[in-house]
Each structure stands twice: as C-alpha cells, then as structure tokens.
Image: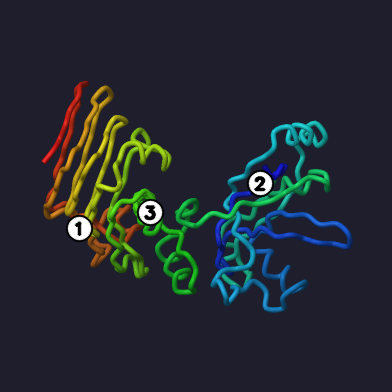
Amino acid sequence: QSEFSVNSLAVPRKAKEAIGAICKLVKAESSMTLNVEYNQLDPLLRSTVNPEGDVNDPSTGFSPYPGNINQLIFSVPDYHKQLESSKGHVPEFVNPKYKDSTKTSFKSPTRLECMMQDYPRTIPSTSKVGFTLLEVWVAYSPVKNSPAEALAKAEAGNPSHSATTGELDIYRANCNVLKHLGASVEDPAKTTFNGIYVQLHPRIVWSPSFACTTEEVSKKIDCKTLQVSQGSSLVLEGENITINGLSLNGSLVIRASNGARVTVKNLRVDNKGWEWRPLDSAEGAREEERMRGFTVIKHETRVIEFDSPGEYTVDA
C-alpha cells in the first residue's frame, strides 16, 4: 500500500533503552530513514537537535524515536536490484559494549558487524523507507539480561528484558488476545520477582499447533463464554481443541494428540491451582528458577488428555 522498499517493525522505546531507534537523518537537501544504534543515539542528538540527548517526551513517557526490533520487510524486486548492484556489500560497523559509563573497559569482545538494519543506507535516495509501530506486548520482549543487570535497568526506569519478564509477557500477550476477542479475564496482580516489580496475569499458554494467530484463536475458543480468574493457569496442547464455554478458577491442562478432536462445553473448573512463588533464597533453586526469580508450586490440576484419535466431548 505504501510502496516501501523497506518497512521496519518498531515499538515505543524508553530513552536510554538498549535498542536501536528509527530516525530520519537530514543533511542539506538529502535525507534517509534508518536505524541508529542506541549507543550512538545520545551523542548524535546532543550534537544536533537536542542538547539533553536521548530523553523521554514528557507527554508520552517514551522517546520520540521508535525502537527498532529488527523485524524487517523488504520489497523483493528492489532487494534483487540492490543485490545485483552492491554484490551484497553493506557498510561495516563497530559496536563496543562497555561495562559502565566510564567506557574504560569492555563488557564483551568488540566485533566488526555488518547489520541488516543498515540496508536502507545502500538503496537509491528515491526509495521509500518507513516503519510500522506496534504495541510492545504484541511484538517485543527479549530475554537478554542477567538478574543483576535486569534489576539495574528496572531501577533506572527501563525495561528489564530478563527471563522474569520474558515469561510473564507471554501470559500478558495471550490474555490480551483473549480479552480482545471478548473473554472475561481478570486483571493482573502486582508482585516482585528478583527485585523487579511485575504484573502477574493469568498464566495462559497454548502450543503452536493449537494457534499461531488471533484469528486461529477466535475459531477455537468462544471467548464470549470464557471466564478466567487472576490466579488461574490454562495450558492447551493440540491442534483440534475447541472451547465453547469455560469458567476457570484454578489450573486446567487440555492435551489432544494428533487425530483427537476435543470439544469443551460449558465446563467449570475450580481447584487450588498453581502458585508462582518468589524465591526466598537462591540456595537449592534450579538455574532457570534463579533466572526467573520464582518457582511454580502445582497444588492441584485438572488434566483432560486424549492420546488416541477420535471425537471427544467434555462438559459440565
């Protein structure tokens, strides 16, 4: 529709967040829209348009420059022409990672990079380059920081991008999808894991075989007849599961093997469920528990499982 040669998916970005920013760079009569790495953005802004550097817009609480999440959409005909012209060569870039703001020692070995997000620098000036801004919960929750690094980022007012939030954001995204489709899903509870204040949504997950898109979810769950309490956990595994009426206050696991078609009708589940318990101490905890800052205590679970082909109905 917009005839972009390059379209970058982006999310709202917090100032100083370790994610590149989509900017329009202007010099004399020429301009280009492309990603600027986060460690270059602040000095660039200070030397050009804002002496305060990389700061949030007070009216939105976010940086004016969207965060680039490196999900790029290329026009294939334009890409082919550029490959023929450039033979695949793109500008090189040195990306140092320092231990702290003194910039006197490296956090990890510095390397020479050729970045795909620099592709717009190589195309003709007449090419159209743009971005599509998505809400963060839809598209971006990396897991890339240790618990200590994550806590420091959270205390500075930035996303922690940790194993803690990476898992909890899956629950948030799935709850948002169900709410969007009309389900009654209770609001999250506030809690703390690894020192980070988080919102704990109902723990709802489904396998890729069950659904990969909102449209697929809408065809398999009648969301207007779905009720889920805040402390509940729901696990759906299998391609042919249909839910037409479910009230959940506790934990429910539904598994359907290949060839098993399971229909849930007007089912009510009420049990002690699963508990996401913060770790009192790292001693004795498994590595993944230390990374996340919590352990899962499975008090009580309703399991509905069919491992043979056939038609099955589960009702009240």
* Rendered residue at 63%/70% (across/down): 104
Q: Is tag 2's residue or tag 3's residue first in the polypeptide sequence?
A: 2
Q: CA distance from mark 2 to mark 3?
A: 26 Å
> Disc 3, disc 1: CB below 8 Å?
no
* Rendered residue at 34%/66% (across/down): 194
Residue topped by disc 1: 275
Closer mark to the observer between disc 2 and disc 3: 3
23 versus 242 height, above or below: below
**Residue 178 visible to an observer of this rendering:** yes
Q: Is tag 1's residue or tag 2's residue first in the polypeptide sequence?
A: 2
Q: Along the horizontal axis of the image, is 107 left or right of 307?
A: right
Which amino acid lies under the numbered mark 1 shown in the image of this protein? Glu
**Residue 167 visible to an observer of this rendering:** no
> Where is residue 279, by image quadrant?
bottom left
Q: Residue furthest right?
A: 29
The C terminus is located in which quarter? top left
Residue 7's tag is: 2
Closer mark to the observer between disc 1 and disc 2: 2
The secondary structure type at the circle numbered 2 is strand
Which amino acid lies under the numbered mark 3 shown in the image of this protein? Asn
Closer mark to the observer between disc 3 and disc 1: 3
Q: How is the image coloured?
A: rainbow
Image location (x, y in percent) of residue 106: 60, 62
Mark 1 packing: few (<14 Cα in 10 Å), some, or many (20+)? some
* Rendered residue at 60%/66% (across/down): 105
Q: CA distance from mark 1 to mark 2?
A: 42 Å
Image location (x, y in percent) of residue 84: 80, 31
The secondary structure type at the circle numbered 1 is strand
Q: Along the horizontal axis of the image, is 310 left or right of 53?
A: left
Nearest the camera: 153 or 314? 314
The secondary structure type at the circle numbered 3 is helix
Q: Along the horizontal axis of the image, is 304 left or right of 106?
A: left
